[in-house]
Amino acid sequence: MRFLRPLPFTRRVVVLGVAAALTACSTLPPYSPPTVAVPAHYAGIPASGIPAAGMPAAGASAAQSGWDVAAPADAAPRGPWWTAFGDPDLNALEARVDVSNQTVKKAVADLQQARAMVDYQHAGFLPTVTAGVAQTRTRVSQNKLGSSLAGQSTSDYQTGVAASWEPDLFGRVRDAVSGAQANADASAADLQSVKLSVTADLATDYFALRSLDTQKRLLDDSVRAYADALQLLQRQRAAGAIDASAVAQAATQLEATRTQDTDIDVSRAQLQHAIATLVGENASTFALPPRV
């Protein structure tokens, strides 16, 4: 039988070093953002740019010489843009979006998760320390001869601490942190986009509802006016002053207006339910009364 001779100490050190280096290697290639060839100016427009309103062409040449590189800020808050409308009811509804809207809550949770992953990947730069405690309880048999512990129980406690650290020689941890940070940045941008979308939907539904309220008031006035006119025509018909066709036409006009009035009530209820969902309220209990 042949026995393998142990490797010399120097070779063992080299093998361990290579193994440690391989575990620290990053398989990700360096990220290269896509590039787009952009011309200096639009076709048909001189390189000096378009003169601004009220500015002579000579001044525009210095201020608008070619393209300006965009600096996206998707993660920046959009601010309370709805306050520009000066509507207290709308302001109160929009203030409830961050607190109660479920879509916004999910986006916030996604951002928190992404940021936690960044912290987790950052921990790869730090040493790892593990500690453990174990207890073993043994009972010696009463039939054991020559033992002073026969029939007794003994406890054995063990503790241990281990520490390790992996140098990031080839950027594996660095790439993991970079990827996690990119995901966190994307989640932050998604959160602001979700907030903008929800607040815009809320404002759109709110103004549509207020528009229906205005139409409702006009139709209510029309229904009352047409009802009065129909009564007048019915009296005239009873007196023989007009024929039945005029009364029938007035009745048809009244019923058509009442139908429009009912349709507005249905549309308003749908918008009110949509607003309730956006602000995180139960649609069956939420109410947004018309303005007098």
Image: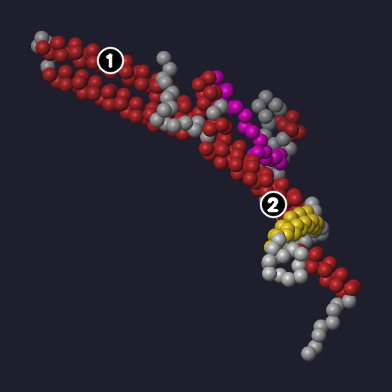
Out of 292 and 150, give the one closest to the viewer: 150
Out of 20 and 81, give the one closest to the viewer: 20
Mark 1, residue position? 224
State the image quarter where residue 218 is shown: top left
Q: What's the residue type where badge 2 is placed?
A: Gly
Q: Position of residue 45 (x, y in %)?
A: 66, 40
Is mark 2 in CB contact (under 8 Å) with mark 1?
no
Q: Is residue 76 magenta?
A: yes
Q: Position of residue 159 (x, y in %)?
A: 77, 56
The label shown at residue 90 is none
Q: Is residue 226 magenta?
A: no
Mark 2, residue position? 179
Q: Which residues are magenta?
A: 67-87
Q: CA distance from mark 2 to mark 1?
A: 67 Å
Q: Compared with residue 158, is residue 86 higher up or lower down, i.e. above or below?
A: above
Label 2: element kind: helix
State the image quarter where residue 129 is shown: bottom right
Q: Residue at x 14, y 20 (%)?
A: 245
Q: Position of residue 196 (x, y in %)?
A: 57, 34
Q: How many marks?
A: 2
Q: Residues within 10 Å of mark 1 (few under 14, many from 20)?
A: few
Q: Residue at x 66, y 27 (%)?
A: 53
Question: In the rendered image, is residue 37 in sight?
Answer: no
Q: How is the image coloured?
A: secondary structure
Q: Position of residue 208 (x, y in %)?
A: 44, 27
Question: In the rendered image, is residue 279 in sight?
Answer: yes
Left or right of 261, for residue 250: left
